Image (cartoon, rainbow, N blue to C red):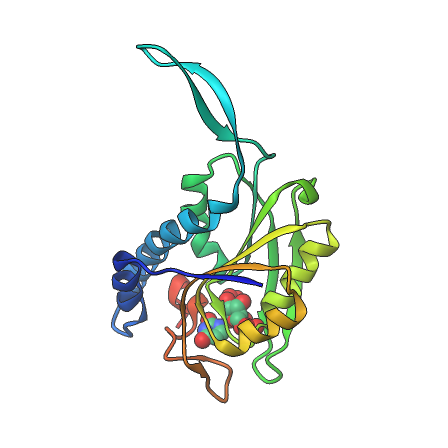
């Protein structure tokens, strides 16, 4: 499994603000989008390009353009929706699928409730978007769902990961690529990431 952890002054700065319990909903959403842009730049490093002849106002040259079919973004509802605008800003023609899933509070097991994917997942670069990787149960299940639908080239994009979640994905999906903003210390007894940022869905949608 390939893991890339963002190391950029802007990422550190924005993540610190995002973690702060006093950060209000509007700013939390904006920061999620801004951090999402930095994650998107890193995550899309795997896209392949090919040469294309073009003419500038001055002369002919060979430029480089994306080769593959449009990538697919797959946010895991709800919190994954917070990262979609950043990825669409950089990949405006990307297709967007959805996976609906919540974590049962008692068992911490993911409960799937919705899925909708664009066609030809097997030929697209897939960016699975979920800000929090805690036990890894939700991500592992979501990755299995896109694999069952044909996906092969899968990158999970998260803002914060716990070591427990990374270990689970290493075991379940060794072929995965992960781009993450930070790896935190661990989980508390309720499965929340420490120090983390709290419940990402609640903080993005103001349902705290
Ligand atoms: C959060 C988060 C992940 C999951 C991570 O979703 O967005 O999907 O928990 O936890 P795990 O790694 O232990 O599975 P949540 O269940 O709170 O749903 P929500 O986004 O609808 O709030
Ligand atoms: N989901 C969240 O939103 N936050 C956590 O810390 C763990 C799971």
Q: Position of residue 145 (x, y in %)?
A: 69, 58
The residue drawn where x is 31% and y is 10% is 58
Give the image location of residue 151, x and y in percent. Answer: 68, 50
Horizontal placement of 89 versus 110: left or right? Answer: left
For residue 4, above or below residue 85:
below
Q: Quadrant of residue 119?
A: top right
Q: Split into 4 quadrants, where in the image is the N terminus?
A: bottom right
Residue ID at (46%, 86%): 188
Which residue occupies the foreground of this view, 156 or 85?
156
Q: Nearer the viewer, residue 188 or 153?
A: 153
Residue sitting at x 46%, y 63%: 131
Question: What residue is rendered at 48% in x and 55% in y?
Answer: 81
**Residue sticking out furthest to the bottom:** 189
Between 179 and 105, which is closer to the camera in this rendering?
Answer: 179
In this rendered view, identify the residue nearer to me: 185 or 28: 185
* Residue 53 percent location from the top left of the image: 47, 16
In the rendered view, tell whether residue 186 sits above or below residue 110.
below
How many marks on residues?
0
Provide residue 47's location: percent of width, then percent of height.
Answer: 52, 41
Residue 196: image quadrant is bottom left
Quarter of the image containing the C terminus? bottom left
Q: In the rendered view, does 186 fall on the left or right side of 48?
A: left
């Amino acid at each position: 499994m390939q893991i890339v952890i963002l190391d950029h002054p802007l990422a550190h700065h924005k993540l610190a603000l995002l973690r702060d319990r006093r950060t209000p909903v509007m700013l939390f959403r904006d920061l999620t989008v801004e951090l999402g842009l930095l994650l998107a730049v890193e995550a899309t490093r795997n896209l392949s390009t090919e040469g294309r002849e073009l003419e500038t106002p001055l002369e002919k040259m060979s430029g480089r353009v994306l080769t593959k079919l449009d990538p697919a973004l797959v946010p895991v509802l709800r919190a994954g929706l917070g990262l979609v605008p950043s990825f669409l800003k950089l990949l405006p023609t990307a297709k967007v699928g959805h996976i609906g899933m919540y974590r049962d509070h008692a068992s911490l097991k993911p409960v799937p409730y919705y899925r909708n994917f664009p066609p030809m997942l097997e030929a697209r670069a897939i960016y699975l978007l979920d800000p929090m990787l805690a036990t890894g149960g939700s991500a592992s299940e979501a990755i299995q769902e896109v694999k069952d639908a044909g996906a092969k080239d899968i990158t999970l994009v998260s803002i914060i990961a716990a070591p427990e979640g990374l270990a689970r994905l290493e075991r379940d999906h060794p072929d995965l690529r992960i781009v993450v903003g930070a790896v935190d210390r661990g989980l508390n007894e309720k499965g929340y990431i420490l120090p983390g940022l709290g419940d990402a869905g609640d903080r993005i949608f103001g349902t705290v």
